[in-house]
């Protein structure tokens, strides 16, 4: 067992410290948890085998002693008249029973507890659990899934069955409640009641659910339903102290509300529709458009625009390598021009880049436009790493390929960024270029603004995960081995605000991408400036 613990320590300490938290932001890193849990199960089974062997010995001794004492107690003097029996009785009580005591007191759990203690320091944290719960709620909102659908695991493209128990759903509702998200608290607590009413066994009680639910609907302004739910709670648990206080408070508020009403208003006008709550408006102005595009709705690819989109063989700026083997190029959008290239990266190259990037993955950050400091943000849920050409020949090869395809130099481009999205991983609408009020964002690089984006899709995604452009009404779906390319700046050097884009939440699947941001410096003769501001 000690050797097993040592091997486990070596395996875990080989994992970079950056993955000790925020597992929910990268599916790639969450795979480590699968193997850790498998090891724990093996350790637990070994402990059970040791315990069963010990209990078997104890049971055998008990049966043996039961038969012996039944016989000896029936005629104690006659039994002890035989000197051998007398000797064996003394020996048993002086030697054998203490040996049994030692056996019973053996701590068979020590090995398992040691293994568990080693691994616990690398377990997900409360932040991970909250992040994963928020991710499910994000998917619920973006793809218009009701809690029952998620609870039953009925998601498109899934090949494994997964359901949420009553206790799981309660955990979802409680996470929302603790975050002050009463809208989702109500949805998930109602799901808990539904599954409890269906007879599902759980440690969660209806009293617990009604306690959270009544206060959540009160926070949403539904005083009448809060009162009704509190009465239900008290009928189940009359001694519930907080519920009694809430009931008196709600009744008082309702009475004050009635007194404020003028005589020409009816009781019906006082009431609010029970159980119907609007999702709160948040900070993102194009939320509805963005989420519609993620669902594949509202795409403005009209027949007229469709006629302007073509497929062709692409040889860059007549690069010799592409004259021999041109890439297949497909128009995804006409203006601004967004194109997709096929067979940009082979499966072998993709796997190698993922292998290099995975140990370096860290929570993706965004630059605060006011301070210029990199920080994590809830609207970007992924992990990323930056690869240099010296890391592996495949990185240099992919960089050269992107240079040949675009006709732009990579000398002033940023390092190859590799990103893996987590549970419900996303990057809400943003610009890749720095705007007028962010002019110092790339000043430290000395290479100007981000002129273009080259985005490699390194995996297929079963559902969700599209790249969408809300201002255009465009949606581009991941296809492994392909890449999309667009210019962020007009030829005049002004930002093209139409390129505001987003990575939709991954509904089902594991999304890997890599991207190269080309900068202005060095492109002067490769992409000459325009003569007007809108060129």
Image (cartoon, helix red, strand yellow):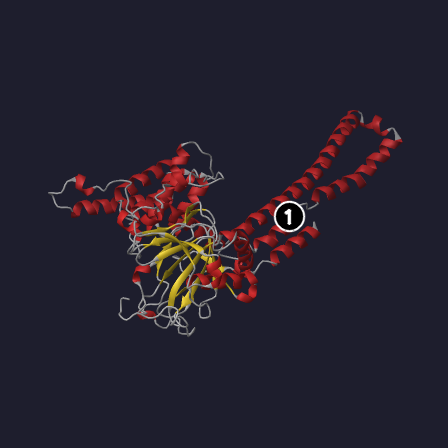
The reply to whether residue 385 is in sight is no
Residue 354 vs 64, above or below: the answer is below
User: Is 39 left, or right, of 72 in this rendering?
Assistant: left
Q: Which residue is mark 1?
A: 112
Q: Which residue in the rendered view is the most extreme toward the left? A: 264
Examine the image and state in which quarter residue 121 appears: bottom right
- Most foreground residue, 357 or 366: 357
Please state the total of marks drawn on the protein image: 1
Residue 532 lies, in percent from the top left, at 26, 70
Residue 398 lies, in percent from the top left, at 50, 61
Other-residue count near label 1 (Cα within 10 Å), few / some / many at <14 / 14–19 / ≥20 = many
Residue found 45% across the figure and 34% down from its top: 200
Q: Quadrant of the C terminus?
A: bottom left
Residue 488 vs 473, above or below: the answer is below
Residue 56 lies, in percent from the top left, at 71, 35
Residue 4 lies, in percent from the top left, at 68, 51
- Most foreground residue, 386 or 519: 519
Examine the image and state in which quarter residue 369 appears: bottom left
What element does badge 1 sit on? helix
- Most foreground residue, 86 or 156: 156
User: Is 75 left, or right, of 441 in this rendering?
Assistant: right
The reply to whether residue 431 is in sight is yes
Residue found 63% across the figure and 55% down from its top: 11
Residue found 60% across the figure and 44% down from its top: 41
């Amino acid at each position: 067992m000690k050797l097993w613990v040592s091997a486990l320590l070596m395996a875990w300490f080989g994992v970079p410290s950056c993955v000790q938290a925020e597992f929910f932001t990268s599916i790639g890193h969450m795979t480590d948890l699968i193997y850790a849990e498998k090891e724990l199960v093996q350790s637990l089974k070994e402990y059970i085998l040791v315990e069963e062997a010990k209990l078997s010995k104890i049971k055998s001794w008990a049966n043996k002693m039961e038969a012996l004492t039944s016989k000896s107690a029936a005629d104690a003097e006659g039994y002890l008249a035989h000197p051998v029996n007398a000797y064996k009785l003394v020996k048993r009580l002086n030697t054998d029973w203490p040996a049994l005591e030692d056996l019973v007191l053996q701590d068979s759990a020590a090995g398992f507890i040691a293994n568990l203690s080693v691994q616990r320091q690398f377990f997900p944290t409360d932040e991970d659990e909250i992040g994963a719960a928020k991710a499910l709620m994000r998917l619920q909102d973006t793809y218009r899934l009701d809690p029952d659908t998620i609870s039953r695991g009925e998601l498109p493209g899934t090949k494994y069955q997964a359901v949420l128990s009553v206790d799981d759903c309660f955990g979802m509702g409680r996470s929302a409640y603790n975050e002050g998200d009463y809208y989702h608290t109500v949805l998930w607590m109602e799901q808990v009641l539904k599954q409890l009413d269906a007879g599902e066994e759980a440690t969660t009680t209806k009293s617990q659910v009604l306690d959270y639910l009544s206060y959540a609907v009160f926070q949403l302004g539904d005083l009448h339903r809060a009162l009704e739910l509190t009465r239900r709670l008290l009928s189940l648990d009359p001694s519930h102290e907080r519920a009694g206080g809430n009931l008196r408070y709600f009744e008082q508020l309702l009475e004050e509300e009635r007194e404020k009403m003028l005589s020409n208003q009816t009781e019906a006008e006082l009431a609010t529709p029970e159980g119907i709550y609007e999702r709160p408006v948040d900070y993102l102005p194009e939320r509805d458009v963005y989420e519609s595009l993620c669902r594949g709705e509202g795409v403005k690819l009209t027949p007229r625009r469709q006629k302007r989109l073509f497929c062709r063989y692409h040889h860059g700026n007549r690069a010799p390598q592409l004259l021999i083997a041109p890439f297949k190029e497909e128009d995804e959008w006409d203006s601004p021009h967004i194109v997709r290239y096929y067979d940009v990266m082979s499966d072998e190259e993709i796997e190698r880049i993922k292998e290099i990037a995975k140990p370096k993955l860290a929570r993706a950050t965004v630059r605060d436009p006011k301070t210029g400091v990199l920080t994590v943000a809830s609207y970007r849920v992924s992990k990323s790493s930056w690869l240099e050409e010296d890391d592996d020949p495949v990185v240099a090869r992919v960089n050269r390929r992107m240079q040949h395809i675009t006709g732009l130099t990579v000398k002033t481009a940023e390092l190859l960024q590799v990103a893996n999205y987590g549970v419900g991983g996303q990057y809400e609408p943003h610009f890749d270029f720095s705007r007028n009020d962010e002019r110092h964002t790339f000043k430290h690089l000395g290479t100007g603004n981000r002129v273009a984006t080259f985005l490699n899709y390194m995996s297929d995604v079963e559902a969700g995960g599209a790249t969408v452009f809300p201002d255009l009404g465009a949606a581009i779906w991941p296809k492994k081995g392909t890449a999309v390319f667009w210019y962020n700046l007009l030829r005049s050097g002004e930002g093209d605000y139409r390129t505001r884009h987003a990575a939709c939440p991954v509904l089902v699947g594991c999304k890997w991408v890599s991207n190269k941001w080309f900068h202005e410096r060095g492109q002067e003769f490769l992409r000459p400036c325009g003569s007007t501001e809108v060129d």
